Amino acid sequence: MDNGRVVKGVQFVDIRDAGDPVVVAKRYDEQGADEITFLDITASHHGRDTTIHMVEAIAEQVFIPLTVGGGIRTVEDIRNMLNAGADKTAINSAAIYNPEFVKEAAEKFGSQCIVIAIDAKKVSGEGEPNKWEIFTHGGRKPTGIDVVEWAVKMTNYGAGEVLLTSMDQDGVKNGFDIELTRAVSEAVNVPVIASGGVGNLQHLADGVTEGKADAVLAASIFHFGEHTVQEAKEHMQSQGIEVRL
Amino acid sequence: MTSKICAVIDYGMGNLHSASKALEHAHTNTQVIVTSDPETILKADHVVLPGVGAMRDCMGEIKRMGVDQVVAEVAKTKPLLGICVGMQALMHHSEENGGVECLKHFDGEVKYFGDNLIETQGTQTGEKLKVPHMGWNQVSQQAHPMWNDIEDNSRFYFVHSYYVNAQNKNQIKGHGHYGKDFAAAIGQDNIFAVQFHPEKSHTAGLQLLKNFLEWDGQA
């Protein structure tokens, strides 16, 4: 291995539904995860304080980058999460309702802590050129927004990273939507984290080598004890991907 | 053993929560204070100069709050650790924001990676690299007590678009590479500064912070 080379296959772990998040985060940290993404899918006002306390508890024990998403709607939400110990916040639907919010957030806190989260669904038919659209409300509501154009726009507005989830692949365990991942990754000049669809370790490697993702996120293969983060990284390394072991 | 005090200089740029938590975790016998008060900083045993964001804003605040004078005083005697933009601020000047004069504790300048950064070595040769550089890179060490118990070429977490081009190569204590070689760590006497984020670099980062809090400032 060369000295000082960049690691492409960073491992992320999404701990949205895996028991006590603090315990889970600590476990993945020990297994060698390079970054942790905490998505609060309930994100009701009622639950905000709980989330903030959870982020605080994680940040006291986990010394790798921590991204928090879900219900980030205002500058105040971002400030609360950063003060609680998050390093980055992921903005999703709030950006769709008000794209200027991303610009404002990036100017205020710096691009390095603003992640644009995109939930994409393929809308082109068989034989047509690929086209993906952004959907909200758990994939029920189309927005008419083109995913690749949106990713470019949001990164031009200052988002420092793209968290790209394929809603077609999410939970299907068939692997990432490789074409979607590559289309977005080649269109923007910031790191793209591929998410949605990982069913085995080869899928993670494919996300980097074929999808050109800068990082890959997986949840269920880790949550349910099928694989450790360490195993995933060893497998990626065996495919010629540089990882931190 | 009496407890020591580490001051993390707060000049209003960015979130210092991670750095102070990691310092506390790395060395439980040290009291970590996030402060902008010159008196508190000058009383501390160890001082950390952090920083995120744009150089012009950082230097603006550093000067407005008199942090430049405090740092100059600290630099005479106490172990001082610069992190990320805190490292860059210790250089002569930066080409960010059309050119900004910095604190001039080290000769050399802070340069932009460029919009067309192409990898020149290794398996990714010819590939276009994204800027900012964000990720875990290896750091090749030059002998220094700050590297105690850290394996050479360990990986640390970086987030930066600008890098330090040190003029005095003997001051480079850690070499990094991202499309081009850059100084991942520099040091002289009681000053040590790193481009990466030790507070986000897992066990290697925590060890470096522990080494700093145990360091007497002798290189």
Image (cartoon, coloured by chain):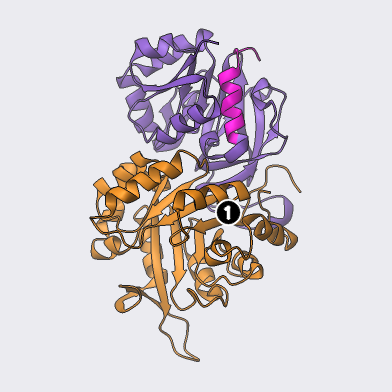
Chain colours: A orange, B purple
**Could you say where residue B62 lies in the image, as x and y percent from the top left?**
36, 23
Within the image, what quadrant is residue A53 found in?
Answer: top left
Residue identified by numbered label 1: B129
**Could you say where residue B44 lies in the image, as x and y percent from the top left?**
45, 12
**Vertical relation: A44 (above or below) B41:** below
**Vertical relation: A238 (above or below) B103:** below
Magenta extent:
B205-219
Identify the residue shown where x is 61% and y is 37%: B203
Viewer-nearest residue: B33 or A114: B33
Predominant secondary structure in magenta? helix
Q: Is residue B91 in view from this perspective? A: no
Q: Is residue A110 left or right of residue B171?
A: left
**Vertical relation: B159 (above or below) B152:** below
- Residue A189 colored magenta? no
Q: Is residue B149 left or right of residue B41?
A: right
- Indicate the quadrant containing the N terminus of chain B: top left, top right, bottom left or bottom right: top right
Identify the residue shown where x is 37% and y is 18%: B67
The chain identifier of the residue carrying mark 1 reads: B
Within the image, what quadrant is residue A154 found in?
Answer: bottom left
Viewer-nearest residue: A175 or A222: A222
- Indicate the quadrant containing the C terminus of chain B: top left, top right, bottom left or bottom right: top right
- Residue B206 colored magenta? yes
**Could you say where residue A109 lies in the image, as x and y percent from the top left?**
34, 43
Q: Is residue B69 left or right of residue B155?
A: left
Q: Amino acid at mark 1?
A: Leu
**Number of numbered discs on residues:** 1
Mark 1 closeness class: few <14, some 14–19, many ≥20 residues within 10 Å: many
**Vertical relation: A206 (above or below) A158:** below
Q: Is residue B219 in view from this perspective? A: yes
Identify the residue shown where x is 60% and y is 63%: A225
Mark 1: secondary structure: loop
**Could you say where residue A87 lies in the image, as x and y percent from the top left?**
42, 44
